[in-house]
Image (cartoon, coloured by chain):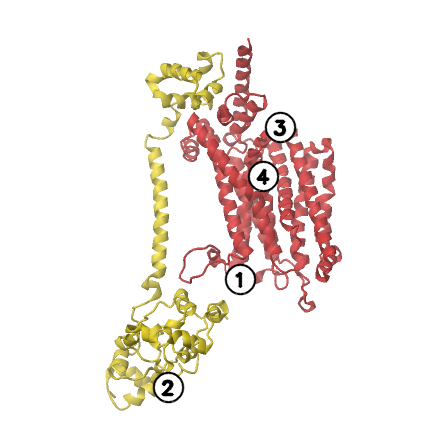
Amino acid sequence: MIAALFPDRTAEALLIHLSGQESEAAAHEKDCLAAIFGAKLGWHGCKDALGALLQGNKGTGLLAQIFTASADTRLRAVLFLAALVGVFLIVFGGGFAESTFLTAVGWFRDQPVPFSHQHHVGSLGIDCRYCHSGVETSDRATFPPTHTCMTCHSQIWTGAPILAPVRQSMLTGKPIEWNRVSAVPDYVYFNHSIHIDRGVPCVTCHGRIDQMPLTARAKPFQMQWCLDCHRDPAPHLRPPEQVTRMDWSDWERDPEAHKDYGALMVQAYGIEPAKLIQCNTCHR
Amino acid sequence: MAQETQGAEGTQRLERGEHITREITRIPQRFPPERVWLVCFAASLCLLALFAVSAFVLFRNGVGMWGNNIPVNWGLAISNYIFFVGIGHAGTLISAMLLILNEHWRNALNRFAEAMTLVAVICAGLYPILHLGRYWRFYWMAPYPNTMDLWPQFKSPLTWDFFAVLTYLIVSLLFWYIGIVPDLATMRDRSKKRRGQVLYGIFALGWRGSARHWQRWNQAYRVTAAIAVPLVVSVHSEISLLFAAGPIAGWTSTVFPPYFVMGAAFSGFAVVSMIAIVLRHAFGLHDVVTDRHLDLLAKLLLACGLMTSFGYVAEAFDALYSGEDYDVQTLVDRLSGQYAWSYWGAVILNFVPLQLLWWKAVRQKPVVLFVVGGCVVVGMWLERYMLLVTTLYRDYLVSSYGEYHASFWEWSLFAGMLGVFFTPFLLFVRYLPMISAFEIKEALFEDRGERKGKAGGASVHA
């Protein structure tokens, strides 16, 4: 059809001109074509019709037969939604990884006996090491054996129903099965004794245990949290003899008074932060 | 007078173009060798099932199922990985490099070469994950903010590898898809069935072939090609650094990056030649993939082969020239050690049949070219095996000498991986225009000196 209209030109040469080359001839052809098709199709429709014709379509209505007019919009909407879902998944994944649902921060665990640290530490003032006796000498803080409980509870609250599992354990010799609150994965070699010896207070990792009626994890125990301290240990160091102290607000209230303590102790102990963040410090 | 001749020629060319479009788009519509295809597809599905079984067994039992252990800790998995990435390179070379160089003969080969690249890169990408052991942690290779405060080791070639292969996959996919869009539109318009119209139509993205479409397409295609060209060199150079960045005698030659790139292109051209010969024979495409195309492919194969042979010489020279005991010992182990068969197998299969291609008459004989290509593919596979095993099996310490024998599950995974390769490729051959119809037509016009108007608008011929 095009060849019939413009016998002296091949159709594709025409299209080259129409595709944007500004010249007098092109302008003329544009006018001619617009005059022929323009009234019916409009200028863009006219170009599309020509393109379709050259591609071998017989006629220009093929697209309309396959897809409805809104198909394009719907495809774009689907692509946009897919991108949106992708963004949502990333944001959700990031939030989920940091959430207390995964880290268990603040989630109380059920225990065979509802032991209250608030009562024993906060009110009675029992030192952490009275029960967790391994903390200064071994990698584990250790759970107290039932005998430790019985040092007092053989004398007081001897008939309390709430302590029945403790008495049962004493009778049978079978330890109470406490549910672990603060745990690192088994591929992490954590050693309590060195942290206590260098003066990282209990409260740094375990929180205000003296205010917990039931025990919950206070810190996320994620690797990034470990590294926060290992990269720069100085501000976290305290005098080792006060390591079980829970309330350090007076120390923190007056940073000027203690500003040199951490740095000096890092020097004195020979702590090298570069070594503290090597993989095999914790993963052996 | 002159105008009339031009008009007549133009009509002729349009008819010839129409013929080519019909010839190529007819294949997915009325697939002529349906039974042969079904047999091939069934076979490749069996291989795919073998892959699934091998991968399942591997995932269940761990890499202990394989024969690799200290000192040869990289076995078939890594040599096959390099092999598959390597054959992909020819696709990118043909499609991107030759597009930018304006070599029109590429148009008969680029589409299926790119498809081959795509499936080869997928096969290659699977291997490191299968090799990982803790495959479920493979995403740790990606740098993403995480609660471990951990990032990949950016100084390690293994990290570069992750980026190289991923980039290669994405760019290859984009390039292939952009290239196929106009032909998908043709398929859509020629489909008689509603299902075909809709499926081709969706992926044709509303292509109507208007001047504006062609202009945008040209820009996108050429920009993607320009991005793809450096990948031809970078990806395999980087893979050579997986070896060369370590302190292992036998992997320290400075020729490694170009040696690997040329080897990759060499094996790739061999595969492209073989595929071209098979497709041309199966679908009677002798007027599209002509003898001249085979001739040019054979020339490229010869050139790449000779450059690869230079790598062999340079590698041996490096060892001798350095005079390092361990380097020389590794060379001796290669030439005469327990795995000497892999070295001499590679040398003979790669370079002896290749010499036939010096003669034009031989280059245009499909059967001979196919056999030479087959020899090169096997030879280059042996080369990768040789590079890994002959270097590692005798370590610095005599006490840690060891042997490597691939286990049954390694071989079955390799056979299965051929299923991963052929299944999508056969689907591509069956359902998509495997040769770029509109680019052939474009070349048809340009080759006859029809270069009117600006070069950018020239591709409106389709």
Query: x, y percentage for residue B240?
Result: 61, 51
Q: CA distance from mark 3 to mark 1?
A: 50 Å
B40 horizontally vs B201: left or right: right
Q: Which mark is residue A155?
A: none
Q: CA distance from mark 1 to mark 2?
A: 41 Å
Residue holding disc 3 = B286
Chain identifier for the red-coloured part of the image: B
Residue occupying image coordinates x 57% and y 53%: B413
Q: Nearer the viewer, residue B5 or B412?
A: B5
Please name the amino acid that badge 2 sits on: Gly
What element does badge 3 sit on?
A: loop
Please, which chain is the residue tagged with disc 3 on? B
Q: CA distance from mark 2 to mark 4?
A: 76 Å
Q: CA distance from mark 3 to mark 2?
A: 89 Å
Please name the amino acid that badge 3 sits on: His
Q: CA distance from mark 4 to mark 1?
A: 40 Å
